[in-house]
Each structure stands twice: as C-alpha cells, then as structure tokens.
C-alpha cells in the first residue's frame, strides 16, 4: 500500500498515526522505516490506497468466498473490455 495522493484513489484503510506508532512500539520494531514511509511524524491520520492502479482490493475478513469470487470475476471481465 501507499499513502493517498489523490482524492479519487480507492481507500483501503485509514488509521490515526498515534495508533500505528503505539502498535509498532508493542511489536518492538525499528520504527524509522515505517515513520518515514508513512509520514507518521508529520500526519495525524494516514489514508492507505492501492500501490498500483491494477491492484485489486478484496476484503477476505468480511466477505464470503462466493462474494470474493464474484468481485474478482467482475474485476477481470471489466479489464478485458
């Protein structure tokens, strides 16, 4: 994922940077790469979007396998047109 740059980009998730910093501290990770990549030291909230325009977002945590298959099928049929 990457940070949102344009308002028309599909939003994958958003989170307050303070929550992400706290989670990294708990995980005892070196925060510097994450802080720099996601601008945790300058932004109050980050908005994540697909990294590439061809990325497909499928939420496997809240959709049934049938719904996921339908989403993928519809995505692929639109790409072929």
Image (spheres, grey):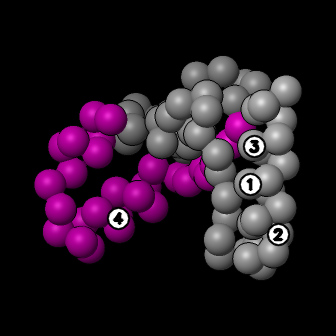
71 or 80, which is in the foreground? 80
Tag 3 secondary structure: helix
Residue 60 pos. (x, y %): 65, 71
User: Residue beneath label 3, please?
Assistant: 76
Q: CA distance from mark 1 to mark 2?
A: 9 Å
Disc 1 and disc 3: Cα gap in Å? Answer: 6 Å
Q: Helix or strand or loop: what does disc 1 sit on?
A: helix
Residue at horizontal 83 percent and vertical 35 percent from the top: 78
Give the numbered dot on residue 46.
none
User: Is residue 79 highlighted in magenta?
Assistant: no
Q: Earlier in the sequence, mark 1 or mark 2?
A: 2
Q: Which residue is the site of mark 2?
A: 67
Q: Which residues are magenta?
A: 10-37
**Secondary structure beneath label 2:** helix
Residue 72 tag number? 1
Circle 1 Cα neighbour tier, 10 Å, few/some/many (<14 / 14–19 / ≥20): few
Tags 4 and 2 in contact by the CB under 8 Å rule? no
From the viewer's perspective, is residue 14 above or below residue 77? below
Q: Are marks 3 and 2 in contact (CB under 8 Å)?
A: no
Q: Earlier in the sequence, mark 4 or mark 3?
A: 4
The answer to whether 40 appears left or right of 8 in the picture is left
Image marks 1 and 3: residues in contact by CB distance under 8 Å: yes
Q: Regarding mark 4 in the picture, which secondary structure is present there?
A: helix
Displayed quadrant of residue 65: bottom right
Quarter location, residue 27: bottom left
Q: Which residue is mark 4?
A: 22
């Amino acid at each position: 994922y990457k940070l949102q740059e344009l308002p028309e980009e599909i939003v994958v998730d958003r989170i307050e940077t303070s929550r992400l910093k706290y989670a990294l501290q708990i995980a005892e990770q070196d925060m510097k790469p994450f802080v720099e990549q996601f601008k945790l030291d300058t932004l109050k909230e980050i908005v994540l979007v697909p990294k590439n325009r061809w990325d497909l977002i499928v939420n496997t945590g809240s959709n049934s396998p049938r719904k996921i298959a339908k989403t993928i099928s519809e995505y692929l049929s639109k790409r072929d047109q």
